């Protein structure tokens, strides 16, 4: 029996329990393939496929086509939005409770005109177009009145919460800063106040030197399984240059970011047989976008395990695999 361990996330103070004997080795994980059967390039009932524009809300933005396509990425309002631009952020009292209108913006980014082209299967220039779209919509929404937080995320597969197969991402701008986000920023502030350094820069420097959990890198980004990964094969893609705000990414770094995201998702696709996953781009809130204690990064979480009773009750995740083993497995030829 391998020894169990509890590790702490240096950036948040959160603990994760590692219980290797509760699960098999990395290659024993069952496949969570999102698309067991081959998909066509085009689907007549899919609103995101070219030629089906009558099913779409008005197109907000699109990038020029690549490889013979008339467009490469598109952005549309979400047809079933979590938040809408109507109303505002004025709070109201209801008895002992506080409420406000569901104000914000919720958009869908159509990643590709091809119904079956996930990021891992794209060409490099297609991923670059997607990153350009992320950046453009991030900056556009950040400039809207009362937008305190702009969050870009992607749900791949049924277990990750997606409702349409066609490859797409989403972006939501809110007029509030959720406690979860504020807490992460405050933890970063505490670390900076104590040590005078960004905690993410310290994590980055250690992982770059230690190399046990690093799975990929280029001139601008380091990709690694975090020391206290909450789920098997959780991966962070972290810029080597300190910036709190994704909006401040340099033009040259966008290409490197696309390359890093592409390479890591290809690894996950190949080694874990196209698992369902979520990824989130963590970035500073509106008034902290130049903070010395914050550092933007992208977090990928494959959906290989299920949250159960202890985790819900305690808030502590149980990971049946070790980050070092996950990293070694992803790099195996």
Image: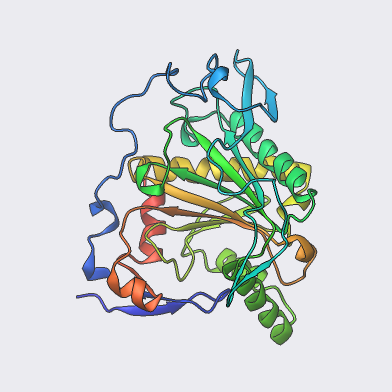
Label count reads 0
Picture coordinates of residue 52, whole percent (x, y): 53, 17
Front-lying residue, 143 or 185: 143
Front-lying residue, 252 or 280: 280
The colour mode here is rainbow
Q: Is residue 261 above or below residue 13?
A: above
- Answer whether residue 199 is visible to the viewer in this image: yes
Front-lying residue, 96 or 307: 96
- Left or right relative to 242: residue 234: left
- Answer whether residue 19 is visible to the viewer in this image: no
Looking at this view, name the residue that lies furthest to the bottom: 194
Looking at this view, name the residue that lies furthest to the left: 1
**Residue located 66% across and 43% down the image:** 256
- Quarter of the image with the N terminus is bottom left
- Left or right relative to 222: residue 192: right
**Residue located 75% across and 50% down the image:** 142
Picture coordinates of residue 15, whole percent (x, y): 44, 78
- Quarter of the image with the C terminus is top left
Picture coordinates of residue 72, whole percent (x, y): 62, 24
Q: On the image, which quarter does residue 35 sit in?
A: top left
Q: Is residue 83 above or below residue 208?
A: above
Q: On the image, which quarter does residue 43 sit in?
A: top left
Q: Is residue 108 above or below residue 311?
A: above
Picture coordinates of residue 57, whole percent (x, y): 61, 28
Q: Is residue 42 above or below residue 148?
A: above
């Amino acid at each position: 029996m391998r020894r169990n361990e509890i590790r702490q996330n240096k950036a948040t103070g959160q603990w994760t329990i590692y219980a290797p004997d509760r699960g098999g080795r990395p290659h024993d994980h069952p496949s969570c393939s999102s698309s067991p059967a081959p998909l066509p390039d085009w689907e007549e009932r899919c609103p995101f496929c070219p030629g089906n524009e009558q099913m779409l809300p008005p197109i907000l933005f699109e990038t020029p086509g690549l490889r013979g396509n008339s467009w490469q990425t598109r952005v549309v309002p979400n047809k079933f939005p979590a938040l809408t631009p109507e109303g505002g952020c004025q709070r109201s009292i209801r008895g002992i409770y506080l409420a406000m209108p569901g104000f914000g913006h919720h958009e869908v980014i159509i990643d590709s005109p091809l119904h079956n082209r996930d990021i891992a299967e794209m060409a490099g220039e297609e991923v670059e177009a997607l990153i350009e779209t992320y950046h453009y919509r991030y900056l556009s929404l950040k400039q809207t009145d009362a937008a305190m937080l702009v969050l870009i995320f992607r749900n791949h597969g049924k277990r990750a919460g997606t409702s349409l197969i066609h490859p797409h991402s989403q972006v939501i701008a809110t007029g509030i800063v959720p406690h979860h986000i504020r807490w992460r920023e405050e933890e970063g502030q505490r670390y900076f106040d104590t040590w005078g350094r960004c905690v993410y820069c310290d994590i980055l420097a250690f992982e770059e030197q230690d190399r046990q959990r690093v799975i990929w890198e280029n001139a601008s980004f380091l990709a690694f399984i975090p020391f206290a990964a909450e789920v098997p094969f959780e991966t962070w893609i972290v810029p080597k240059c300190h910036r709190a705000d994704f909006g401040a990414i340099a033009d040259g770094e966008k290409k490197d970011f696309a390359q890093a995201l592409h390479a890591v998702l290809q690894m996950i696709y190949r080694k874990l047989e196209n698992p369902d996953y979520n990824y989130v781009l963590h970035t500073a809130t509106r008034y902290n976008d130049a903070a010395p204690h914050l550092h933007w990064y992208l977090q990928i979480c494959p959906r290989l395990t299920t949250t159960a009773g202890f985790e819900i009750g305690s808030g502590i995740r149980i990971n049946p695999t070790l980050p070092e083993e996950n990293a070694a497995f992803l790099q195996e030829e």
